[in-house]
Image (tube, grey):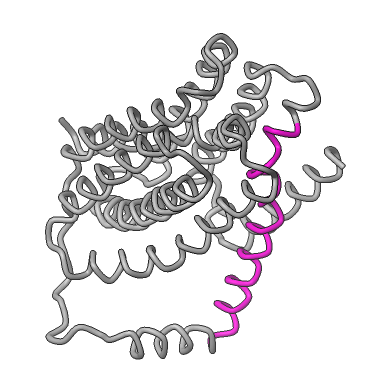
Amino acid sequence: MSSYLRFSLFFAAFYSSMGVSTPFLAVWFDYRGLSAAEIGLVFAAGMTMKVVFTLLAGQLADQVTRKRDLITAILALVALLMAGQHFAPSFGPILVLSALATALQAAVVAITDATTLATARSGAFAYSQVRAWGSAAFLVVALALGPILQASGPEPIVLIMAALVAAAVLASRGLIDAPTAARPATRPDLGEMLRGFIGLLRIPALRRLYLTAALLQNAHIFYYAFSSLHWQKMGLSKEQIGVLWAEGVVFEIILFAVVPRIGFLRRPVALLMIAGAAGLLRWSVLG
């Protein structure tokens, strides 16, 4: 099997679980009796822990030669955490299990993207080509799950997420470990890492990049956390909610397809400007 097929299969399996969690996890929280404030706290805890876990995962990945095994182990833990939410009796355990699962998934994204980009540099494929399969899987699952949940209710949502992550565990065994750069003789401590990060912030272009990306991400945080609940309270069915999420992914797939072919889209500034304009359009229409 070619490296393109191996990575495409993994991305499809990995992002299929997000085709459940992104549109419907808040619906499951609401079904379990969490208030709007508690749902917001769950999402905020996951976002906060993402930062910490991504940094730790990056440092760990630098010390591990077989990153495939690390990805497999983390995903197996994520599947258990997601399944555990189904049996959690109250808000507290749900908060802990969900935040940990979210943070560990983000760590996998960081490690996988680094591994994929390193393999892509060999000319085997373009990153956008394999990542597009993740978006396609998200779309298919979001569309297919709406009618299923309309019939069954929200109860099985986290179990479906866990099953799809388990499929990603199997798909991760096909990943190829990219050649690893020579490791330094000594590992950097936390102080050295912080000084390195501060050094990056002294570069004006990077400061602007970080600030712009942070503003763009946070502009949509309420959409990702509460749009499905808002649409549900407006009377939309779960099929319709799935379609609303899927249509956005259609444009994401188109973007991944055209980026390698259009020169100016390879520039980060151009992509950030397009993202900002699209965000203004989204909130102008929805507002």
Q: Is residue 112 above or below residue 29?
A: below
- Tell me what residue is drawn at x 56 percent, y 17 percent: 153
Q: Is residue 278 left or right of residue 264?
A: right
Residue 46 position, x and y percent, is 50, 55
Residue 19 is left or right of residue 219, and the answer is left
> Residue 22: image x %, image y %?
55, 37
Residue pushed farthest top?
A: 151
Q: Where is residue 215 in the image (x, y as percent from the top left)?
A: 68, 64
Q: In the figure, 160 relative to 33: above or below?
A: above
Which residues lie in the magenta part? Answer: 203-230
What secondary structure do most residues of the magenta stretch adopt? Answer: helix
Residue drawn at the location 60% of the way across and 54% of the way down:
41
Q: At which x and y percent is residue 97?
A: 41, 48
- The N terminus sits in image quarter: top left
Furthest residue in direction front, as rendered: 89
- What residue sits 52% from the left and 26% below the top? 139
Instruction: Say whether residue 224 is magenta.
Output: yes
- Is 186 left or right of 237, judged from the image as shown? left
The residue located at (22%, 69%) in the rendering is 62
Depicted 169 relative to depicted 49: above or below: above
Please name whichever residue, 234 or 209, is drawn nearer the observer in this view of the structure.
Answer: 234
On screen, residue 139 versus residue 164, left or right, reads right
96 is within the stretch colored magenta: no
